[in-house]
Amino acid sequence: MNPLLAAEALYTRRQFFGRSALGVGTAALASLLGRDALAASPPLPARRAVPGLPDLPHFAPKAKRVIYLFQNGAPSHVDLFDYKPKLREWHGRQIPAELAGGKRFSTMTGNQTARPVLGEISKFAQHGQSGAWVSDFLPQIASISDDLCFVKSLHTEAVNHAPAITYFLTGSEMAGRPSMGAWLSYGLGNETEELPAFVVMTSRDKEASCGQIFYDFYWGSGFLPTKYQGVAFRGAGDPVLYLSNPAGMSRAVRRGLLDDLAHLNEIKREDFGDPEITTRIAQYEMAYKMQASVPELTDLSQESEATLAAYGPEVRRQGSFAYNCLMARRLAERGVRFIQVMHAGWDQHRNLNTQLKIQCEDTDAPSAALIRDLKQRGLLDDTLVIWGGEFGRTPFLQGKIEDTKGWGRDHHPYAFTQFMAGGGVKPGISYGATDEFGFNAVENRVHVHDLQATILHQLGLNHEKLTYKFQGRQFRLTDVHGHVVKDILA
Amino acid sequence: MRFPPSLTALLRLSAFSAAASHGLGTDAPLSFERDIQPILSENCYHCHGPDAEARKARVRFDQRDSALAPAKSGAIAIVPGKPDQSELVARIFSDDPEEVMPSPQSHRTLTLAQKNLLKRWIAEGATWNEHWAFSPPQRAPVPAPDAPPSSLSAQLPVHPVDAFIRARLAQEKIPPAPAAGRAALLRRVTLDLHGLPPTPAELDAFLADRSPDAYETLVDRLLASPRYGERWAWDWLDLARYADTNGFQGDPERTMWPWRDWVVNALNANMPFDQFTIEQLAGDLLPNATRDQKIASGFHRNAMFNGEGGRIAEETRVENVFDRVETTATVWLGLTFTCNRCHDHKFDPLKQTDYYALYDIFNQMSETGSANAGGGRGGQMAPFLDLSTEAERAAVKTAQAAIDAIGKEIETFELTKFPRPEGQPVAESPAAIQLPGNLFATHAKVAPARRDLNGLLEALPHFRATAPDPAYAALLEKQIAAIRVRDAATASITKVMIMDQLAKPRDTFVLAKGNYEAKTDLRVLGAIPELFRPAVPPPPSSTSTSPSGSDAPSTSPGETAAPPARLSRLDLARWLVSPANPLAARTAVNRAWQAFFGTGFVKTAEDFGVQGERPSHPALLDWLATGYVASGWDTKALHRLIVTSATYRQSSRVTPAEHERDPENRLLARGPRFRLPSWMLRDQALAAAGLLVDQRGGSSVKPYQPPGIWEEATFGKKTYTQDHGDALYRRSLYVFWRRIVGPTSFFDAGARQVCTVKVARTNTPLHALVTLNDPAYVEAARVLAQRVLAGSAADPDRLSAAFRLTTARTPTPAEQKILTTRLATLRAHFAADPTAARELSAIGEFARPATLAPAEHAAWTALCLLVLNLDETLSKE
């Protein structure tokens, strides 16, 4: 059957459940189906979109969705991406006072009097035609560097994890503003009505070497209605809370009960006239759909062995970073707008020599596999992937130079690297630069708000115009700042 | 998942907010405040408003004098009566991108209608008045009862609330709705005042009471019940950001429930709202403060507390003071002060120094910002109040002494058990070095009296089974028992966090960009915002850095220039509920109205400032606010007044045309109808099932929660240990609230992280999953099934019983038919699948009668779950 007709048939069957509430323009539907038909993945069932604001996007988008691979705890830029031979040269000598003097660090090194430079603990090499410098701790990422755009001149103001992560994800260091995914689902809606527009998945390093927790305000809706908040898929059991029917209640029994419930509610609506009842009927119907679509989402039986192998040995373990990366691709295929994958384990204050490599091993293959997988399936063009942490790490040492086992680096907001792929961002480039110690971003500096403005831009949004009035003020993701980094756009 | 309102609805909405009842007919005079200020504020104040730093060209439109004064160029922005000579008019109508205002960079544009309004307003003389919310409420006369006829007006003397509401409806030519049915009204008012549905007995009694004041009697009964305080405490807890943990990393537990119980008691005692305010903001500073008044002062200790590793204590302390300032401003002033951390307000006449003057008031307590400065347990940070009795403290001492004694016994025993040179620790003994696993570290290396419970529990099996030494094992068992006794005794010591006052005041400086370490040299003393200060005499609020010592509050009347006095927290609290504050009663009345009708008069309950929405019924808001104060801030009287109005008692039935006309029911031509808060849904389900345990107060309880929620959020550091028995069925108010991951049964709830005066009401599939699948609801359905099965043998009666317990009515024949048909299907299904029947009929821990046939029970459980999920059950109707 023609998928469009199939969708129409489905629509007719459920027309009763409120056309006005869930309706989507036929043209939009056709375009979605058109895209599905072209995709290299096995065909997924036709889906209907959830509309966003009527006047959005502001202009033609390059990307339709975002996968943010957020590396909580802050990976060390000087050990992984920002190669600085000077550090090796100066290893053990005090970092020049004009760089570190008077700067704010966390209390861990804020009172440390000696600040010896620490050479990179990994080996760097250039990769691909672009000649990107990447650490040998990240061989898979290095191998796709021609698909990546490294932004090496990021900087922020926050020096502690929670405020810094909140800054990246909500535009404010203070908890309570809407997160990026909430803004996007508010503004753009979703390409499917069977899954949430904004999905969050979290993982942590196996040793739990650092204790950053995942606060729900990292995916909160702030003052936007709570329906825009991220739905955090759980790392064990039902991915969505209360997804499973109670023991003893089959799907068929539930179907029958929901049919009656809809019927009774419809009688109520006819009597009382409250259109909210129509919405409620539709939402119960969608809950029922999610009870099928979420298990379908997490069923990996149709994935080829080659695909699974690419994501690494942890891919079958629910709650691992590898599993979450694969799930991110599956969510992207199914039309989810914003997929926030967060991995904690990068906060190497005292165990750089042991933990950094382990973290790299856990994240390298899954991250690269995700990007390759998206590319193979034709999804990378309109999916923007971002990889990085909330700040960098100090080019100087935290700890004592003679205690090699206890080497570490402190939080460093003044310069760090993230990379992006797909979604209309130039592949195979490095943008911006730090000074010769990797201490300050000095060339083409990119602030947190600039990155946010750029992400919104790729989704067809003017970051100054996506606003919401609260407490008398028009709020936006980028506060009153932010410039689109045009130089990195394809 | 989103359903944008139709365009027409949007148009309606804006028509109600700004242009209000007058429409913009050519003859009605313009009101600055209603018609003009919103345009100026939204489009111009950003650069031409109260914020001196951001102001461009030295022109400001929030003050008449400035707008009428010539600029440097000689141009005059506004020449009253002469739009042609007014630069403002020239600029807003200009086509030149260099000239036009608002400038293209601002991304703001005026509609032609707005431009014409501004022009007309200048032509009419450009009258200015102060923002409505900054003037004291005026008590307008109750409108004459020329309201359109309705079924109610015949029965009732015209209630003042109705006179105001109907005057407005008459302007709009909308008739009020007829009265709601008695049963529907009973359910509505019982949910509103108790947060619970009426019992069948209450329903019968009310339906049988034909006396003319049956409803008033009912309301008085509801107001007198202690369930009233439990219902209304919830809203106050949301606003006070109450929780049982600190939030942030580690999220340690704290004990604030005595403060929560204080709120419930104060509401039940109908404590006047001025006293309620003063005791919570400054109960500790009252002369001869009682224990309860000190507990009340814990209001501002409910803030989150960040004890993250590496966190700078002063930064946490400053954040907490910010939170206290902003919460106070939101609750008692309806003003959003957050912007003022960094700069003057963009829209409201609030200065950065006003912010820090309030900051100074809250800066004078002893909290240090360090998580280790407790002396209490876990998340308890000094100062706190020890609520323990003499006997409880003695029990701890006795238990500790017992541990010390057994420690000595063990020490002696170990001299022979772990032989080593005299004076050496156990760890030096060759016998100790052989201990396996952790035991060397946890046992041998720790002095006997200091060994902890976990280590001992690991050691015991070793000495009992692996390397048996019965005498030694017996000693360890004795020690474990003693530690447990001590821990239990310690746990019964309740300490609650309260406020206090530093003996030596802290200096307060304006912080640049709100950065805790960027003190400017601008020193500020505690004061109320300049906006609210009487014109004469002006108490100075800020001075430049003054020599130390001059900040001591002056108590003796100086002859000439007294040194500036710092207002205390008590002064501030008293001022907030004094006639000098135009906003306390208005914000309180607005929140009450919001709770009853779903939306306040001022929809932006958190913002009464220039950018907030104008009140839908300004005269009624002020009439209620002034009446509230005149009644001695009698909250129960206010609630009684509202719920006895015909407006409240209207039916919530609506036609499509009526709905189209006023989708949000701002004009109140019908009664309120909206989904109940999720916490109330849970209480309702428990009550309908007969499960609710009506026990008040005490430490928080842990009902059902899916496994792993806390563990996942805290990396396994916190384990949720579910309670059993009665604790599962206490009201939602008493459910333990972990701040970083709140109770999973609640949705659309305030996050209890910052002050929330208005919670969202959304409609998502995730909510449906909760009420369909959360064991709390499935168990309620299961026990409701038991209840109706025990009540009658006839299906129609059972169905009626289930309906009456949830919706306060019996099902219609059409409903009955659908459900009876379903019942037959379910019976057949569960008879054929006994396993499924057994499973479904056994969900939850509440007992089920063994005699009940599982198939029948399961069929009714499924049916009752359906009834609990009816839109009508989920809604206040």
Image (tube, helix red, strand yellow):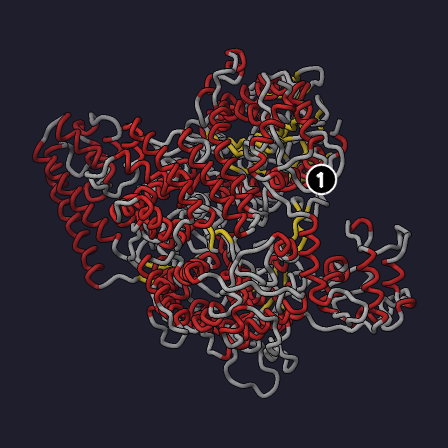
Residue B475 % position (x, y): 11, 39
Quadrant of the drawing holding the N terminus of chain B: top right
Q: Residue furthest bottom?
A: B559
Q: Residue at x 67, y 20 (%)?
A: A147
Residue B727 % position (x, y): 29, 49
Task: Tell whether B683 sits left or right of A53.
Answer: left
Residue A37 % position (x, y): 66, 19
Q: Which residue is mark 1?
A: A56
Asked if one can make out residue A160 in the rendered structure from this viewpoint, the answer is: no
Task: Tell whether A340 sits left or right of A435.
Answer: left
Residue B807 % position (x, y): 41, 52
Count of all numbered marks drawn on residues in the image: 1
Classify 10 Å Cα crowding around label 1: few (below 14), some (14-19), many (20 and above).
Answer: some
Which secondary structure lies at badge 1? Answer: loop
Chain letter of the residue carrying label 1: A
- In the displayed structure, B849 sits above or below A458; it is below
Task: Tell whether B474 sits left or right of B121.
Answer: left
Q: Nearer the viewer, residue B622 or B874?
A: B874
Asked if one can make out residue B624 in the rendered structure from this viewpoint, the answer is: yes
Q: Amino acid at mark 1?
A: Leu
Q: Nearer the viewer, residue B562 or B617?
A: B617
- In the displayed structure, A316 sits above or below B684; it is above
Q: Nearer the viewer, residue A332 or A357?
A: A332
Task: Tell whether B602 sits left or right of B65.
Answer: left
Q: Residue at x 73, y 42 (%)?
A: A55
Q: Nearer the viewer, residue B438 or A396?
A: B438
